[in-house]
Image: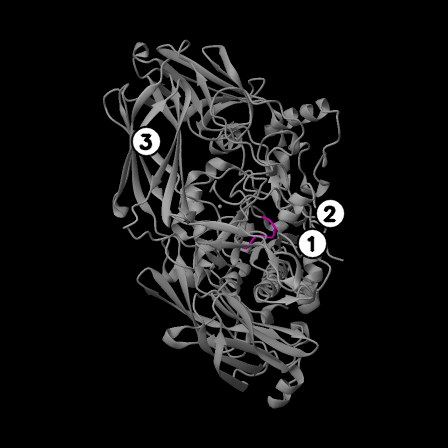
Amino acid sequence: MAVRRRRRGAAAPPEPPARSGRRPCRLSGRRAGAAMGRAALLPLLLVATAGRAGVSAAGGPEVHSLRGSWRLGNGNGSVVLRGEVPGCVHTALHRRGLIQDPYYRFNDVMYRWISLDNWTYSRTFKTPFDIRKWQKVNLVFEGVDTVAQILINNITLGRTDNMFNRYSFDITSMIKEVNFVEVRFLSAVSYAAEQSRCHKAYSIPPACPPPVQKGECHANFIRKEQCSFSWDWGPSFPTQGIWKDVRIEAYNHYHLIYFSLTSFFVKSAQQWSLEIESIFDVVSSKPIAGVVTVNIPKLQTQQTFGVKLQPGEGSIVLLVNINKSSAVEAWWPNGHGKQTGYNMTTTFIMEAGYQIEKFSKAYFRTVELVQEPIPGSPGLSFYFKINGRPIFIKGSNWIPADSFQDRVTYDTLWLLLKSAADANMNALRVWGGGVYEQDEFYNICDEIGIMEDKSRPFIASSPTNGLESVKEGWLSQNPYDTHYGDTHFYDYSNDCWNWTVYPKTRFASEYGFQSWPSFSTIEKVSSTEDWSYTSNFSLHRQHHENGNDQMLQQIGRHFKLPQSTDPIKKFKDMIYLTQVMQAQCIKTETEFYRFSQSEIIKGEGHTMGALYWQLNDIWQAPSWASLEYGGKWKLLHYFAQNFFAPLLPVAYEDKDVLYIYGVSDLHADRKLTLRVVVHAWSSLEPVCTLAKDGVTVKAQSAVLIYMESINNLLERCRNCTRKSCVITFCLVGEGGLQSPTNHHFLSSLKDAVGLEKTHLSASVSQRDDIYIFVLQTTAIAPFVSLDVGRIKGRFSDNGFLMIEKKKVVVFYPWEPTSVEELEESLTLTSLVDVV
């Protein structure tokens, strides 16, 4: 029976960020934090986000950040220290040496006291300007985590109870030359529990996470990062702190507080347009007139608008028509074209005074979610058209990169997102139980071709039956119906190599299998006694019920379990096998979704999206991720690079017949050669080779290109049996076009006959900024893994079936290293090394 995991973040739509200091209404039991990025099924978000506003020297606002060192103390004053802003209590305590790394061993439980205490941030600051010059002075918090009372000079400004809101407080009448500001936090755990006690109308499940998660209760009663109370892949660290910038803003007349732009194509006029929305805080008691000029030099577009701001919160919405004589290059998802963006300046000149210049980048694209009848099938399609072209969505699911958001730097985001693009992904689904990601996240996505902006299609939950769910009153009778919308699918009990267990769905937005992170990642947060698959540490880090056993059971279907008498080798072998198993399982499922895109069988098919769970890790623990905490690629991520390749041959068996499909994301039909090679496990020399020329693989489709009974194939390849041979295959075309080499196992590898102990060796040399590893083997080596321990970087290929004597692999370092360091750190492992 398929195990379907609790829906991740399927809840109410997110609330918009607050634009004033008004206190939001009390929560009323909605699943508060679990809705960010619900619509991020789309090729991920992004029209340009705004840059910093520049102002003319004369009359412009004074903006002064209060980031830096604050005083931090707990509820009874027994702990006092310096805390950085932006930051949180945990990272402050760690930086001052008062606690260990919160991720070390069992510290998530040992440091529970931090989250149960009530902490206060405070500081004194001198006002850096003449107070009398300004009509309005605001104290602005971009992010307060989460429940707090905010005071200046012992006067309460207001309270916060939403981690995701921007809070702005008018301090014009309270600010002095020297000021004392305080942020008095209330434990998020205590607050959530109290909110739950006060709510008596109906029950809000789940009250608490499963015991295996070692988490806190009632996360759904607080508007806070839901996974900070624990999840099945993450620890419980309900943080307190000022997690984004805090500043003083002083201005006269008006002040720009919000700016966004959205592109769209007007079919009737055959013209691109931009909608620019600007919101101002208008201090003046009378309307303020002025002009706004929008300039996009490369598109020879400049337009000037007369505008009028109304007192209070004044908004301006402008429609800019792009010059028709300029050729607009559209933004395309990764693998489908360029990510062209255009520099743009928006200048506001108002009668009351100063000039504001807003620098941003405009991207032009259209995104349509197509839900329409399919010939020969009940239900509706569910796919995305980007710039009018149907695109198969390839990618994964994004979770917060750290339990402590102040540790998530631009470099952290770049490394993780670039790794997604390097694995041929074109989309990420931002999971709903995390945070609204920072602007840098979306800017990077724009640059590297990962799409999710406000003009795009929005679905009410995920999974969903799309329009059918709307028709059913937003509550699907069967949320796993394969004929509509997107589906989630988890099955840990059946054989993951059996493609028939997978749903032939319209769109797969979640599916996955667990593995352990590499030993070098685990080693940093553990001690010697922890290095066993059954240690207390290993059980503690596993937050999914029976997760460690489920991995063993899945491994045991096709591989021999480690039996080494050396406990550390046995542990390392288990880690390796969990990664091999995870990679092979998700490869099988993803390839099934990719070859199902062009066919309808028994009313099911036309699969147009595969987003496996999950991309990244929040800490060092077993999970569904393909990137470890710190960014190291698991074997799954190397496999993703291949199974998401733009051109790929995919094989599967049905009733002893081998089928090979040609899957293409290319924009043109290609005439190719299919090469099929059969090897005996006992020899590096091929048993037989088949070349099928003139194979036509149609653009953006999956077509059957080869079919033969296994018996016929084995008869033609003398001395081959299912247990003694393996099949590899690839597609080759003109101009150097070549797919990755794929493989099809004819039996479980634990039953393979002829596999020999091999001697694997590697020589390392440097070429400019990269390193060349030349591997040699004396026999066929399945699932060859190269690992250089703590040296940061990635290989061009890994986890591969080595069927030639020599193979060249490139290492791309993420930090300076040397040939000597790499040689010293290198570990080579293949399946035959597991004993």
Provide the residue span drawn in magenta: 621-626
Does the CB distance between marks 2 and 1 fall below 8 Å?
yes
Query: Of marks 3 and 1, which one's residue comes earlier in the chain?
Result: 3
Looking at the image, which residue sits at the far left?
Answer: 58
What amino acid does circle 2 point to?
Answer: Gln
Q: Which residue is mark 1?
A: 481
> In which quadrant of the rendered view does residue 712 lie?
bottom right
What amino acid does circle 1 point to?
Answer: Asp
Image side of residue 114 versus residue 554, left or right: left
- CA separation in Å, label 3 and label 1: 48 Å
Location of residue 709 in the rendering, given as x and y in whole percent from the top left corner: 65, 82
What amino acid does circle 3 point to?
Answer: Ala
Q: Which residue is mark 2?
A: 477
Secondary structure beneath dot 2 equals: loop
Residue 53, disc: 3
The label nearer to you, 3 versus 2, is 2
